[in-house]
């Protein structure tokens, strides 16, 4: 049914008044040049806790950011009320360029990648030597993700009172990964935490590991004034229980750096990783790829790396380690 006549003129058309005024829309967005710099500490159901000018504030993502995600470690631009007073809410209007990104997928067939942490300097891969037993395939996958994301890996072995660390350390020695071992008693006295702390100073370190390895216990020893809940390993399944439900950045004592505690993982998919980028973590081998066939997987008969190593340019153990990491993407963590 027509509301107006067949040929209405302008006087016949009713215009609904705009309560927001008659200001025309514009594609020009404000640059927010006076925005304050913030560091994202944690993200929880749309509320983002940031450190701004030594104050902890709560903020939400501005509409103009669209679907762009914000994760712990992001450097952001914040406007609005940045006083940090109870009940106040600021707005994040810009996410600065990330210098490193730790990503993972649910499994190797999942096309959706999840950004875990941004702007971390290193990735501390925490694994127990027993109870639960080590999962080297998961460690390898975390190493690949670290190399791909631009983070330096650090291997942290816990529960060294239950099993020796020598065998596991020897298997990762050719990769040149820094490593440290400790046990619960050493963490309680501060001795173990001090050894780990020496490797974290002046750096932003993300901690990752599967449930029950003592990751949060270690973080609590490093930052004693911020105790997070811990759990026990299930005696039937040998698996830990998730106690950390969201990533959280915590400052080390005396402002010597940051640790980011992340939820325990049971899988670490690498669908997002381009295998050709893993070679960048092996500077002693990378020049040898110049004569490789096009799209070489570095694990095939015509790979030039075999001749490079045979010519004495690199240690054969390094090539074996590279190929082990490249094969990791083809294997499941439990294999």
Image (cartoon, grey):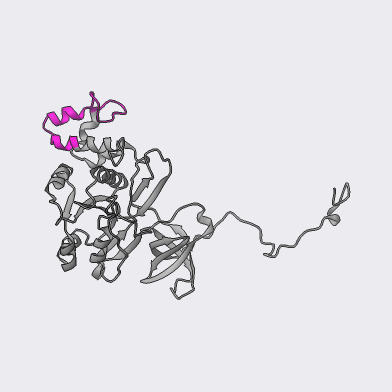
43 over 169 or under it: above or below: below
Q: The C terminus is located in which quarter?
A: top left
Q: Which residue is drawn at 28% across and 43% down?
A: 141
Q: Please state if 31 lies on the left or on the right of 17 as rendered.
A: left
Q: Is residue 312 above or below residue 207?
A: above
Task: Report which quarter residue 110 is drawn in.
Answer: top left
Report if residue 324 is visible in the image.
yes
Q: In the current view of this chain or complex, which residue is farthest to the front?
A: 236
- Is residue 55 found inside the magenta-colored segment of the image? no
Question: Horizontal and vertical percent for residue 305?
Answer: 20, 30
x then y, percent, for residue 92: 47, 62
Which of the 4 image quadrants contains residue 203? bottom left
Residue 307 on the magenta span: yes
Q: Residue furthest bottom?
A: 85
Residue nearest the viewer, comparing 229 with 226: 229
Q: Over which residues does the magenta segment extend? A: 291-320
Name the foreground residue: 105 vs 4.
Answer: 105
**Position of 269 compared to 77: left or right?**
left
How would you classify the magenta stretch by its main secondary structure? loop
Residue 134 vertical position relative to residue 186 in the rendered view, above or below: above
Q: Where does residue 195 sit, x and y in percent of width and height?
A: 16, 61
Count of all numbered marks drawn on residues in the image: 0
Q: Residue 34: in sight, yes or no?
A: no
**Residue 257, how many percent across, how many down?**
26, 63
* Residue at the image position 50 percent from the left and 52 percent from the top: 67
Residue 303 sits in quarter = top left
């Amino acid at each position: 049914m027509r509301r107006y006549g067949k040929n209405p003129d302008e006087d016949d058309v009713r215009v609904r008044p705009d309560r927001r005024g008659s200001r025309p829309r514009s594609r020009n967005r404000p640059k927010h040049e006076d925005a304050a710099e913030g560091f994202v500490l944690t993200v929880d159901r749309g509320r983002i806790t940031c450190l701004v000018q030594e104050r902890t504030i709560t903020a939400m993502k501005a509409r103009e950011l669209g679907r762009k995600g914000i994760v712990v470690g992001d450097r952001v631009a914040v406007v609005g009320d940045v006083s940090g007073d109870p009940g106040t809410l600021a707005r994040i209007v810009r996410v600065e360029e990330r210098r490193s990104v730790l990503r993972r997928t649910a499994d190797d067939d999942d096309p959706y990648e999840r950004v875990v942490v941004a702007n971390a300097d290193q990735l501390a891969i925490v694994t127990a030597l027993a109870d639960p037993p080590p999962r080297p395939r998961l460690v390898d996958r975390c190493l690949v993700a670290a190399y791909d994301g631009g983070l330096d890996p650090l291997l942290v072995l816990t529960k060294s009172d239950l099993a020796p660390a020598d065998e596991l350390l020897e298997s990762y020695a050719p990769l040149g990964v820094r490593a440290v071992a400790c046990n619960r008693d050493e963490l309680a006295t501060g001795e173990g935490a001090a050894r780990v702390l020496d490797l974290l100073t002046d750096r932003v370190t993300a901690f990752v590991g599967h449930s029950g390895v003592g990751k949060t216990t270690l973080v609590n020893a490093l930052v004693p004034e911020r105790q997070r809940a811990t759990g026990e390993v299930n005696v039937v399944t040998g698996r830990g229980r998730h106690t950390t439900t969201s990533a959280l950045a915590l400052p080390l004592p005396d402002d010597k750096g940051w640790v980011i505690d992340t939820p325990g993982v049971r899988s670490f998919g690498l669908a997002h990783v381009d295998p050709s980028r893993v070679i960048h973590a092996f500077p002693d081998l990378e020049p040898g790829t110049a004569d490789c066939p096009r799209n070489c997987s570095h694990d095939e008969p015509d790979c030039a790396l075999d001749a490079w190593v045979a010519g004495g340019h690199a240690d054969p153990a390094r090539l074996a380690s590279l190929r082990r990491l490249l094969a990791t993407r083809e294997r499941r963590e439990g294999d």
